Image (tube, rainbow, N blue to C red):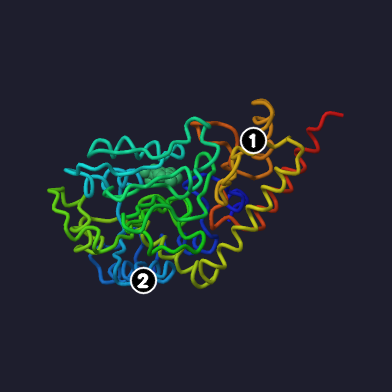
Amino acid sequence: MTLQNKLNFSGGPGALPEKVLVQLSEEIINVPGPGLSILGISHRSEWFAEVIAELENNIRTLMGLSDAYHVLLLQGGATQQFSMVPMTLLRGQNSPAEYLHTGYWSGKAIPEARLEGPVRVIWSGSENNFNRLPSDDELCFSPDAPYIHYISNETVEGLQFQRILGRNDVPRICDMSSDFLSKPCEFERFSLIYAHAQKNIGPAGITVIVIRNDLIEHTTGNLPGFLDYKTQIKAHSNFNTPPVFAIYAVLLVSRWLINDIGGLENMAAINNRKAELLYRVIDESDGFYRGRAAADRSLMNVVFKLSSAELEAGFLSRAQAAGFSGLAGHRAIGGLRASIYNAVTLEAVEELAGFMDEFRRRSKPN
Ligand SMILES: *Cc1c(COP(=O)(O)O)cnc(C)c1O
């Protein structure tokens, strides 16, 4: 492992556990059993059928899902789900689906849904520059909506819901791309959850979709097979050639979460500790570091800035020289961002916190 891999704070594709990277690097040449490179194993092999079955099962175990749910592994990223969800559930509907506009990524989901049917944005953070999330008394959900859609963690602005929204008689749909499997959650209160792998659980190439049977039982849309949840379910996520490597990498991460970390409770304890460390440095910096969120701070993406662009550039170049990477803010808003996904270790975060303290002391005017 290089120092840069250990100190990778990238917003995505993000850090992966050292153990997984080492195993993958060996298996680029030889996967024990098949004796083949992971890059050259047939997606129709018995070996790969077992990989899919074990991964589905691990996701069920981690999330505590009953048989009422299917687990799918699809390509196209979260962006494809921005379309697939309304193609399946909103085409031909008269009452609007309800969307929350809480930041950059929900702002990408909404126009895609509008292409398929009526949408009502029930809350938007645009007036306050997306520096907080809505409270319950700002939200009024209609019983007639075909579904409600929101994003659990706004990756760019660094805002995270710590509760489940919506009403129990309307299907809840959630994009959990940037905090999936980072903490326990009552996952069965959702009808559909999607999360691409490349932030918290693997490399780019697949998106995990967890979908309740009854959500799609009665849908009839004439969709291309690739974009049809039902077809994909029947094919066990193997409708056309899936990204074998990415799926295998996510399997190794799921084993790491279960066997090395010990499940989502333990993962959450580590993640809380990591976020606490960085927010403390920010809060105790006398305004030197300025956190972006006024409330609802994300435990995954710590977004902050300094008093000037010059100081931020100095921070980034000093950080790079010390081995840190991925600390520049998203290109849409600038500033700085430390993404502390599951695979970023507590030790790496302690190093970053130390670096930030040190940088502040050195920059203080005398
Ligand atoms: C990064 C991100 C996306 C975009 O995902 P792609 O896989 O690139 O399509 C969508 N939603 C959230 C919450 C994200 O963080």
Please state the horizontal and vertical placement of residue 276, each as a whole percent of the image.
66, 53
Above or below for 276 versus 290: below
Whether the residue carrying mark 1 lies under 8 Å from ligand 1 is answered with no
Q: Amino acid at mark 1?
A: Leu
Residue type at the position of mark 2:
Asn
Q: Foreground: 55 or 83?
A: 83
Q: Earlier in the sequence, mark 2 or mark 1?
A: 2
Q: Is residue 52 left or right of residue 157?
A: left
**What residue lies at 65% left-to-right and 31% top-to-bottom?**
312
Coordinates of residue 77 in the picture (x, y in percent): 35, 47
Q: Residue at x 16, y 43 (%)?
A: 92
Residue 232 vertical placement versus 148 (above, below): below
Q: Nearer the viewer, residue 140 or 355?
A: 140
The location of residue 272, given as percent across then percent down, is 61, 58
Would you call the spot at circle 1 few (<14 residues within 10 Å), some (14-19), or many (20 or more)? some
Residue sitting nearer the eye, 24 or 69:
69
Label 1 SS: helix
Q: Identify the residue at horizontal 64%, vertical 55% (top origin).
A: 274
Q: Which residue is mark 1?
A: 316
Ligand 1 within 8 Å, label 2 CB: no
Q: In which quarter of the view is residue 337 placed?
A: top right
SS at circle 2? helix
Mark nearer the viewer, 2 or 1: 2
Query: Which disc, if any, is residue 57?
Result: 2
C-alpha separation, residue under disc 2 versus residue under disc 1 = 41 Å
